Image (spheres, rainbow, N blue to C red):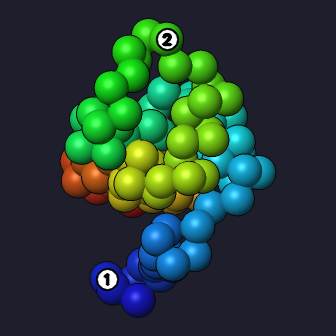
């Protein structure tokens, strides 16, 4: 607990997301918002972003957790992807 806020941390490399969890995150904000397009892991795949479907993104995240944009912060019903400190402060 920090400043009256309780945090639940998860190491996505040790405790990988399930297909259902990825689908749930994508339902809230869209698959393209949770996918780490600028990740070196994605660049190595040499895929064209416009050609990658939501299903492919979900499969790629399952195979390689580095393709999940982090951090993921849920405050109440609000989901914040990518660590914008300003967005997190506004949500709190």
Residue 86's place in the image compared with 15, above or below, is above
Q: Nearer the viewer, residue 69 or 60?
A: 60
Q: Nearer the viewer, residue 47 or 9?
A: 47
- Assign the N terminus to one quadrant of the image: bottom left
Label 2: which secondary element: helix
Q: Say few, some or many: other residues with alpha carbon within 10 Å of mark 2 (under 14 / 14 to 19 / 20 or more).
A: few
Residue at the image point whose x is 32% and y is 45% from the top: 41
Residue at the image point whose x is 29% and y is 52% from the top: 83
65 to the left or right of 54: left
Image coordinates for residue 56, horizontal then vertical, percent: 60, 30
Instruction: Answer with the quarter of the image where residue 46 lies.
Output: top left
Which residue is denoted by mark 2 in the rendering? 51
Residue 7's place in the image compared with 12, above or below, is below
Which residue is denoted by mark 1 in the rendering? 3
74 to the left or right of 56: left
Image coordinates for residue 22, horizontal then vertical, percent: 65, 48
4 to the left or right of 87: right
Image coordinates for residue 48, horizontal then vertical, percent: 38, 15
């Amino acid at each position: 607990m920090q400043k009256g806020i309780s945090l639940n941390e998860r190491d996505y490399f040790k405790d990988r997301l399930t297909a259902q969890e990825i689908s749930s995150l994508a339902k809230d904000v869209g698959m393209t918002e949770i996918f780490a397009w600028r990740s070196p892991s994605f660049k190595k795949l040499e895929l064209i972003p416009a050609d990658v479907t939501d299903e492919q993104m979900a499969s790629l995240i399952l195979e390689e957790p580095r393709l999940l944009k982090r951090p993921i912060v849920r405050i109440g019903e609000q989901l914040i992807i990518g660590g914008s400190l300003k967005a997190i402060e506004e949500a709190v």
